[in-house]
Amino acid sequence: MDKIIQKQNVYISEEEKTLNWEEIQSSFKKTFGSEIYNSWLQKLSLVKEYNDYLVLGVPTRFFRDWIVSRYLDKILEQVKSFKLSLNRIEFKIVEENSQNRELLKIDELSKVAEIKDSILNYNRLNPNLNFKNFIEGKSNNIALSYSKKVCHEISRYNPLYLCGGVGLGKTHLLNAIGLELQNDNNVMFISAERFMYHFIKSIKKNDMVNFKDFFRKSSVFIIDDIQFISGKESLQEEFFHTFNSLMDKGSQIIISSDRNPMKLDRVQDRIKSRLAGGLVVDIETPDLELKVKIIKKKIEEIQNQFKESITLDDDVINFIAAESKTSIRELIGVLNRVIAFSRVHNKILTINDCKNILRDVFNQTKIITVDKIQNVVSSFFNIQLSEMLSQRRSRPLARPRQIAMYLAKKMTTRSLPEIGRRFANRDHTTVIHAVKTISRLSDQDDEMKKNINQIKNILLEQ
Ligand code: ADP
Ligand code: MG
């Protein structure tokens, strides 16, 4: 291990390198305990260090999923204590065979760095997110069927706009459309965030001509998470022109978002109406039947991939499906944990074992803090945190404030007076009133219920 680390450190250019991986590893050992460290974290290697993120090497995809679903938050927290500017971690699967690893040549790594910034790199479609492994259920069949239709009748539904909460399969569908169309079309697949990154980079480099050309020459333009353009005026301006020019020449546009176009906050009206001008399709939260189907399919995939047999009884499968309520991403995360557990302990799991494993999951959710809730709620409603905490009583501020108080009560262990204090020293009776109001509204009002679920998902995902 040491040898490999040293070898890899060589490839990190001297000016960039600030981290001592061995030192970080020993801090992992202290924080996570030697059992977890020896079975998992010890196998992580530092592949590349950037100013704001790290690329860590993992031996297999399974290994990566396990680490991501279980330890990622803590790992990030830990490495941040060594370098504050880090805000994310990416994983690269490196061959376990150490000989191969040592063969990771300088030029291969510098290639990674070279294409890091190129648009092509972000235009890459993931071959694993295709139509074949997208499972149909009541909550997503309309979205699935139009996603397929769009591939056969280009420009008939234009733009096609898919909306739904976090982790429900939007990116999967967009990616599947891209894969389907990429052979015969010039497909551009990009997240709104990446679109902005390139936009700003082009402005800085005084290279807008290339930027415009690049995006406007696609015949299929797929943009993920469009809600990101909220409040960013110049980006919206550019997006509007890109959009119009693509529509003019008959390119197909496919968009995803966490909400309906007309509900996008701080987005110009002319953009909203363009976005809503084609076909808007919702993806809802999955029902039990779909969740069970997904679990069975995932088990099959893992079995094929790792050539091993995994036995989960039907009642265990049903239990997992019923317990994971928020999103398909969470469902898959939970399933990965359960399978890993049964693998490590080499046993067929009972519902009781699953309860224990899930208790872990719920323990983890305790790290949701009042601060975090306040941040997520204010950004969800696109208001300033300071406005949300202020004494102003206008409805666009008061409702989010009440929702944040309600969630603080439901999702943290803080008492009512404690919550009150964190909302600019309000009285606990104000908190009680907020909790009651939002409980009532979320029973009566579908919109409120949907918003609350979405915010919960975001909190649980982070
Ligand atoms: P979103 O973009 O809506 O947040 P993703 O598309 O990233 O959600 O989906 C989250 C995870 O769940 C991905 O791993 C995806 O492959 C998986 N997933 C979502 N819906 C389905 C489905 N119907 N069938 C199979 N996998 C799904
Ligand atoms: Mg997505």
Image (cartoon, rainbow, N blue to C red):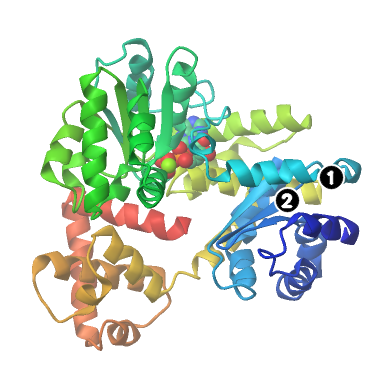
The number of numbered discs placed on residues in the rendered structure image is 2
Q: Quadrant of residue 319?
A: top right
| Residue at (31% x, 14% y) in the render | 154
Identified at 59% across, 70% down, the residue is 77
Q: Position of residue 92 (x, y in %)?
A: 68, 46
| Mark sitting on residue 101 | 1
Q: Amino acid at mark 1?
A: Arg
Q: Residues within 10 Å of mark 1 (few under 14, many from 20)?
A: some
Identified at 19% across, 52% down, the residue is: 265
Q: Please state which amino acid type lies under the numbered disc 2.
A: Gly
Q: Relative to 131, does residue 382 appear above or below in the rendering?
A: below
Q: Viewed as shown, does residue 213 lie left or right of 385?
A: right
Residue at left offset 34%, top offset 72%: 408
Where does the image place residue 275, in percent across and percent down from the top left?
20, 34
Is the CB of mark 2 within 8 Å of ligand 1?
A: no
The Cα–Cα distance between marks 2 and 1, rounded to whole angstroms, is 10 Å
Depicted 202 relative to depicted 299: above or below: below
For the residues bearing labels 2 and 1, Cβ distance under 8 angstroms: yes
Residue 264 or 85: which is nearer the viewer? 85
**Residue 330 in the figure: left or right of residue 401:** right
Which mark sits nearer the N-terminus, 2 or 1?
A: 2
Query: Looking at this rendering, what residue extends furthest in the front direction?
Result: 206
Residue that carries the numbered disc 2 in the rendered image = 57
Task: Give the image quarter of residue 438.
Answer: bottom left
Of helix, strand and loop, which one carries label 2? strand
